[in-house]
Amino acid sequence: MCSTADDGRHRTGTPGRAGATDVEGTTKVHAAGPIRSVGNGRYVLRSPLGEGGMASVYRADDLVLGRTVAVKTLHADLARDPSFRERFRREARAVAALGHTNIVAVHDSGEDTDDDGDVVPYIVMEYVRGGSVRQLLRARADGTGREALPLDRALALTAAVLDALDHSHRNGLIHRDIKPANVMVTEDGTVKVMDFGIARALQSDATAMTRTGTVLGTPQYLSPEQALGRPADARSDLYSVGCMLYELVTGSVPFDGESTMSVLYQHVQQPAPTPSTTRPELPPALDAVVARALHKDPQQRHRSAGEMAAELRRIATGEPPAGEGDRRCGPELPPHHAVTVTAETVAVAPPGAGESGPAGAGAADAGAADADAGVRVRVRRNAPRRGPLPLVAIPAVAVLLAAGAFGVPHLFGSAPRTPDPRATGAYAGCDPASVPGSEHNPPSFTGMSPAEARTCAGIAGLTLDQKEARGTRQDKDTVTRQEPEASRTVRPGGTVTVWVSTGGDPRATGDLEKCEVEERHGKVSVPWLQGLSAADARVCADIARLAVEDAGPLQDPLTPAGRIARQEPRSQDVSTGSTVKVWTSSGGDPRAVGPLGGCDLYATAEQPEAPFLQLKSTADARLCAEIARVRLEEHTVPDALWPAGQVVRQEPASGTRITPGGTIEVWISSGSP
């Protein structure tokens, strides 16, 4: 999720973000309202972290689990589109299942209503304290304005980003907007990639719904195929990583210009510069890796994010990258169709509208560097030309990009295929426009009816294998998923398998709506049972084709008695028919009242906090510790201010995270010396 021509360099931010990105496209941050809470009151919005063109992000309190989270709420104009909301929910579920150290975790998602009765889709993410790489670069800027990192740190940071991408790519998710503003470094140095899936949701929306050839992303980090309106795949992310790595080690992006069009033109047409041109002390091996990542032809880039990460780690240890060879420059692009891009069809976020927020998380904190905060370009194909044309600047009316500009049928072929006359309107994205005999990305069939999918497959020259899908919230008789996905490649005449919804479980309504999960290869994602009544939890598990085992009562003052306080496993994929263990809340400790109120607040939490013991009598402090399930180590100290028998100090302080059953030291006044 990259901003306008400067990647949102005129942004504002505050430390301590929450699972979000630097809200790219931010012009101001609003207070937390028209809605004050989501999740039926579970997540109370406390303060804004940022705002982008697509969503607003808030720091929030999770009243069920007693933790701080980041909540992203979709803007009303996008929320009114049911198809987009469904894609938004589906992507949130997919990202929640990733579970990787270097990816900001998604805890929950759903829909609520604001005071006006409008639907408010939301995503709940972990709240991570730290700063974005953009902020890190800005803090290191020298007197010349150059923002660069030491080579070892840049390599380690980029390798961590690639680890996250390797995991997401293996799970079928493409980021589509890798850039410094979407990468966080926490207070302990952990790298976190934010906003997974959001850019993909937008791209799917543009491709499968509007079919207008919309291009989404940040110009400085956009791959040539994205600039040309072609589907992005895993190698598109690697190109963006190459742009970011170049910036980390040199302090400037490889392609920049005074306008969005000039930047996109350079990505498509101009050879990438080498880092050592700016910093001669950088090793040739780094030049080779960057050149391969920035190759115009996706086929010539690294085969996977894991492969690129391994090469960077070899460079860090002084070893040459594997297969370095002479892959420093790619072949020149052949002539293509020229394209007219009018000023009316280009929408770019205004300068300074690029970011926001705290430093913290993968999709929440700084408010989500939304993909829509970048650039959207609608392209129109014109008649083919026989030779390359120069970039012609026509003031604010039209920009003619030739020989490798927008909307070309294929980046690297020689003889463009004749467009299918049926590829118009809703089917405009079905024509692969590829060179005969070459592999290409299949269309996105998601959301189509079976008839529409068959027509689209016919235009793409593909065979469709239709299967039924159970346990999906998609409308009946619509495609819910496909293999290979639109991010993969398929040979001409190949087969794409699509799953069509057979309709939903009639019980999956209200609080049980999220219980209906899709079965994939004999596995389902465990629904969130916590907060449900024991009876509803059993129904929810049955809807998801899972069993429930009652593990007994659990004291939990944060969860009303009779409702599920804990579950194992949580949100992960398990085999159909698996058993989920649940613990039912028995409420709080009945002794935790009056001066002992709050002593049971974190007694059974997985990460308990020290209770407040200061100013309590020795007897109350001991009972509070017993309720909190911690041990006391008592010391006496003379004190002229506090009466004998009263706690005057404690270590660790109240609110500090402690290990379950840990020890708290207290100093008790023995009276005046």
Image (spheres, rainbow, N blue to C red):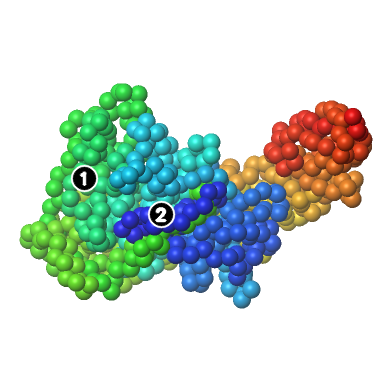
Q: Which quadrant of the structure image shows residue 57?
A: bottom right
Viewer-proximal residue among 373 and 308: 373
Position of 38 with respect to 184 (left or right) is right
Q: Name the residue beneath numbered marker 1.
A: 272
Find residue 437 and name its label: none
- The quadrant of the rendering that contains the C terminus is top right
* Left-right relation of 655 to 151: right
| Label pair 2/1, CB-CB below 8 angstroms | no
Residue 103: x %, y % from top left: 49, 43
Q: Furthest residue to the bottom?
A: 116
Label 2 secondary element: loop
> Label 1: few (<14), some or many (≥20) within 10 Å?
many
654 vs 71, left or right, is right
Q: Is residue 498 visible?
A: no
Observer-nearest of 28 and 74:
28
Q: Position of residue 243 (x, y in %)?
A: 30, 45
Q: Is residue 68 above or below residue 326?
A: below
Front residue of 428/75: it is 75
> Disc 2 to disc 1, how far (Cα)?
22 Å
Q: Judge the density around disc 2: few (<14), some (14-19), many (≥20) Cα neighbours within 10 Å.
A: many
Given the image, on which type of amino acid does mark 2 rest? Met
Let me know if residue 67 appears in the view: yes
Q: What residue is at 71 percent from the left and 33 percent from the top?
A: 659
- Seen at 51% across and 67% down, the residue is 75
Residue type at tag 1: Ala
Is the N terminus in the top left, top right, bottom left or bottom right quadrant?
Answer: bottom left
Query: Which residue is label 2 attached to?
Result: 1
